[in-house]
Image: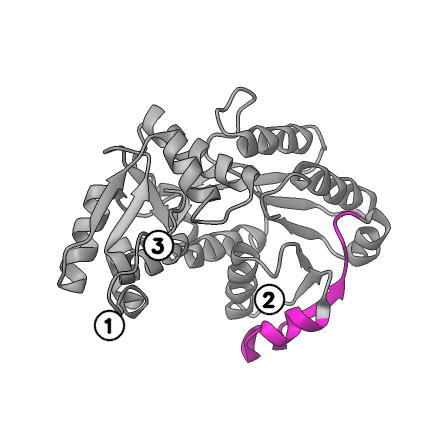
Amino acid sequence: MIVVMGAAGATGGATLRSLAALGTPTRALSRDPARLASALDARTLARTSVHPADAADPPSLREAFRGARRLFLTMANGPHQVRHELNAIEAALDLGIEHIVKVSAPAAEPDSPVAVSRGHHLVEERLRSCGIPATVLRPYAFMQKLLLLAPGIATAQVVHGAMGRARCNYVDVRDVGDAAAAVLTHPAPSGGALPLTGPRAYNYPELTTLLGELLGRPVRYLDLTPASLHAHLTGRGGMPEWLAAHVVEIQRLAVLREETPDDAAFRRLTGRAPRTLEAFLRENLDRFRSPLPPPGPGPAVPC
């Protein structure tokens, strides 16, 4: 039995669907099981049992982990993420989980300029000392996050950011789910850290040029200072302070550290190439179209 935490999120949901496609029985955890069950497609629901659990409540985790052998651990970024993931690890060890697969970040280091990545490092340190196999997945920016740019592109044909011409790796979250399912179902887990990217890195000028070609109209990139981007996100974008700071931090990281694609781990796990950004944008092109006149700039998102 495989337990999936964060099943209501993008990565957890993608992993559930990938496991269901493999015919693997899975236990999905949620604070609101009825809501999660209602959101699953028929094939995934047929292979998934949904259990109540709260990462802030260790006894509920121990009950949910009972009888399981493998754990997929992904939690939403936030102020309590480290404590919640550590709770899950301790409960997994108490209940005899034999392999933990954690979704982390590319720059999970103690001195990372990204606060969330420093938190991932703390969790990874605990995994390294826990005495059981642990595999860390390091996906880069999700292509699905680009859909948050759609309102600004549809209405104002503009993308805001603070990355200059720095390139960013993108990966389709469905590919992350396929990679996670392959690791979780492998008969002999080896552990280690695996980067996950698509086949090409893009900067924002290249991204907007590609979108403009696909849409048949110009899309421009407005490059801001980090402080101006933060103000834009918290003001017009309405983001919480901590999330706006996170967006600015990861865009600055892309400027400080050159990102190049590395899809070797994905190809080895799945036997195929990862999805391309162009294919993803074509699939979702209607989201970036609108007959309405542009009322003003839209929100920005991480790279």
Is 239 on the left-hand or right-hand side of 126? left
**Nearer the viewer's eye, disc 1 or disc 3?**
1
Q: Which residue is mark 2?
A: 24
**Nearer the viewer's eye, disc 3 or disc 2?**
3
Tag 1's secondary structure? loop
Q: Which residue is mark 1?
A: 291
| In the image, residue 275 above or below residue 191 | below
**Nearer the viewer's eye, disc 1 or disc 2?**
1
Q: Which residues are magenta?
A: 34-56
Q: Kindly report the distance in space between the C-alpha atoms of the residues bearing marks 3 and 2.
A: 35 Å
At which x and y percent is residue 126?
Answer: 69, 30
The residue sitting at 67% across, 51% down in the picture is: 71
Q: Kindly report the distance in space between the C-alpha atoms of the residues bearing marks 1 and 3.
A: 17 Å
Q: Residue furthest bottom?
A: 42
| In the image, residue 270 above or below residue 39 | above
The picture quadrant where one finds residue 157 is: bottom left
The residue sitting at 82% across, 49% down in the picture is: 57
The picture quadrant where one finds residue 287 is: bottom left
Q: Earlier in the sequence, mark 1 or mark 2?
A: 2
Give the residue type that dot 2 points to: Thr
Tag 2's secondary structure? loop
- Could you say which is closer to the camera, residue 235 or residue 107? 235
